[in-house]
Amino acid sequence: MSLVDFFGHLAFALIAISYLVKEIFYLRLLSIVACVAGISYNYFAPEKPLWTPIFWNGVFMAVNIAQLLILWQERRGIEFSEEQKEIYQMIFKNFSPLEFAKLMRLSKWLNLEEGVTLITQGKETKFVYLIYNGEVSVIIDGKEITRLKDGAFVGEMSFITGNLPSATVKTTKPTRLIAWSKEELRNLLRRNPAMESTMHATLGADLSKKLAPASSVSR
């Protein structure tokens, strides 16, 4: 294989790889390298340079470079507290740092005493919660069915389905939580489709963990 052919294959290979990359920063970086390879191939491979693909590869490269610089500037200002770093590694590691920062900007930290009702069965709730430290009781028709601890979401089922809560949730000890307004969270996810997919996968994984014990008991 000649060097010119190598650049041709490299350009298309990088484009193919970029379809597998979820992180926008690396996707744009791959696109820039693919454009460089494409320009090289279209300049050297034909008898005369093919200026139309060279021009458009140059345009695509310029756009990606500009967007890459914007992302870099945004990330320079991102700093997380120790609590946020712990949550990121424990729950949100599939999000980019920038996506996680957007989530944190919408969040509110709550410190609740024992016996506080977070959610009431059959009544609309405006928030979805994540337990940072503490414990809550999940009650259906007056009967406790389980208790949730650190790292568990609360209210995520009604957030996903849009239905009224199917259980009442109360704190059983002093508990520290993160709360997100459902409306604000939905608006954020609508503006960021990739982030929405990752969020639903995260909530789905949490639901699977909660359903696993009940499934094993039923067997």
Image (cartoon, grey):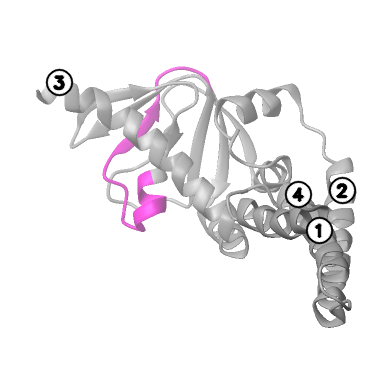
Q: Quadrant of the C terminus?
A: top left
Left or right: residue 43 versus residue 164 is right
Residue at 82% in and 74% down: 46
- Mark 1 or mark 4, whichever is nearer to me: 1
**For marks 3 and 4 on the same chain, the one whose residue lies earlier in the sequence:** 4
Instruction: From the image, tell me which residue sits under label 2.
Output: 72
Coordinates of residue 66 in the picture (x, y in percent): 89, 62
Q: Secondary structure at mark 2?
A: helix
Distance of label 2 from label 3 (alpha carbons): 49 Å
Range shown magenta: 157-175
Tell me which amino acid carries mark 2. Trp
Coordinates of residue 111 in the picture (x, y in percent): 59, 27
- Does the stretch in magenta take in 176? no
Q: Is residue 134 above or below residue 199?
A: above
Tell me which amino acid carries mark 1. Val
Instruction: From the image, tell me which residue sits under label 3.
Output: 217
Task: Look at the numbered discs 2 and 4 and tell me whether their residues touch, using CB distance below 8 Å.
Answer: yes
- Mark 2 or mark 4, whichever is nearer to me: 4
Distance of label 2 from label 4 (alpha carbons): 8 Å
Left or right: residue 204 versus residue 217 is right
- Which one is in front, 185 or 171? 185
Distance of label 2 from label 1 (alpha carbons): 32 Å
Task: Look at the numbered discs 1 and 4 and tell me whether their residues touch, using CB distance below 8 Å.
Answer: no
Left or right: residue 6 versus residue 145 is right
Distance of label 3 from label 4 (alpha carbons): 44 Å
